[in-house]
Amino acid sequence: MTDTETTTGSNTEALSEAGVSIWLDDLSRERIASKGLQRLIAEKNVVGVTTNPTIFAAALAKGEAYDEQVQELKAKGADVDTAIFEITTRDVSDAADVFADVYESSNGYDGRVSIEVSPELAHDTDATIAEAKRLWSTIGKPNVMIKIPATLEGLPAITAVIAEGISVNVTLIFSLERYRAVIDAYLEGLSQAAAKGVDLSTIHSVASFFVSRVDSEIDKRLDAIGTDEAKSLKGRSAVANARLAYELFVEAFAAEKAIELQEQGANRQRPLWASTGVKDPSLPDTFYVVDLVTHGVVNTMPEKTLDAVADHGDVKGDTIVGKYDEARQDLERLKAVGVDIDEVTDQLEREGVEKFIVSWHELSDTVSDAIGSN
């Protein structure tokens, strides 16, 4: 979906041509102002951006790009929550403008910029819905996606927000069971949107399935078990889990209800591979990219991973389809040595929300110091 005439990265171009949309997992005002984001579009086939509280906290903590707006907010006596909202929505709005051409040329498939509702609302359905609507209406750009976590309380919020015609990036998905529920929530939202007369073709969604964190936790447990069989499974669980998620995606959107909605113009909710930076130095730094290649997915990467793929990523075509049985065997072997993947994914969801709340507080503290709030 990228304009290959303007791209020069052969490895990232190969990844794009294999059907993977490359999104950058980072955003800052400096990156926009310096034209760095535009260069990544032109040189490394980047066609979207994702953000989260950690990314914004890091961006606000360094550089001078925010000074002018911070002074304006300080002068008008803005409180911390208002300041965070105005700062982050401006960045996302400006980034959406940068990706406007990609959005238009891909008919809305790519050119997307995601912004997350406050993680403090992750277990409050009504507040999540209200915040999602506020973010959507404030930014007012059709190529924005609102990120909603796939907590139990987030699921009905996803349905309600989709029903309003708002595009959603569902985040913090770790388990296949929860992913099934996310797909159901999306399809129900589309059904409600159709009943309201919303043009389904205008609604886009991705389901962010987290990858590397699964290996990080499971490999720690495998090391603790310490047997040769356990150690032989290190670095295999996350990819297996993601491959089975793709199998589930294919099956779910070939089912009768999904087909009926697609015949009314609905788009499939694409799987998005998140947390694809490699944390284990024994694994190749492009592992969670080149081993998760297939048509119709998104891979959102930190810039370090993107650079590694551009430099030496060996894209060999589809590395998902046809590997489902192998993936199931890996997870069965995992269970046999005593690791309960359901327990792991439940823990990772809790920790994921907690980590984003910590980052949100860091962001709040940074903004509070900048505007002189108590």
Image: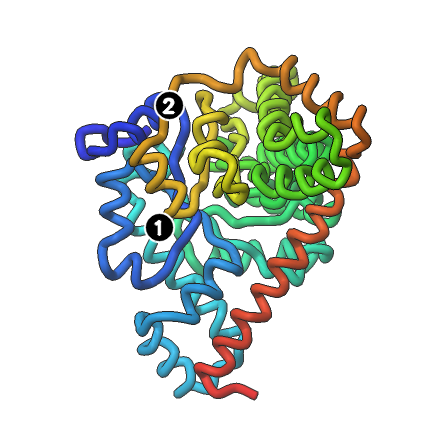
Q: How crowded is mark 1: few (under 14 residues within 10 Å), some or many (20 or more)?
A: many
Q: How crowded is mark 2: few (under 14 residues within 10 Å), some or many (20 or more)?
A: many
**Who's the residue at 44% across and 21% down the image?**
295
Foreground pick, 333 / 126: 333
**Residue bearing mark 1:** 96
Decide: is 244 above or below 107: above
Q: Can residue 361 be seen in this snapshot?
A: yes
Sequence-wise, which precedes: disc 2 or disc 1? 1
**Residue bearing mark 2:** 315
Amino acid of disc 1: Ala
Q: Where is residue 308 in the image (x, y as percent from the top left)?
A: 35, 39
In the picture, measured across the screen, residue 58 lies left or right of residue 261, that is left
**Who's the residue at 20% across and 33% down the image?**
8
Decide: is 110 above or below 353: above
Q: Which residue lies furthest to the left in this view?
A: 5
Decide: is 54 above or below 220: below
**From the viewer's perspective, is the residue at label 2 or at label 1 nearer?**
2
Foreground pick, 139 / 4: 4
In the picture, measured across the screen, residue 353 lies left or right of residue 269, that is right
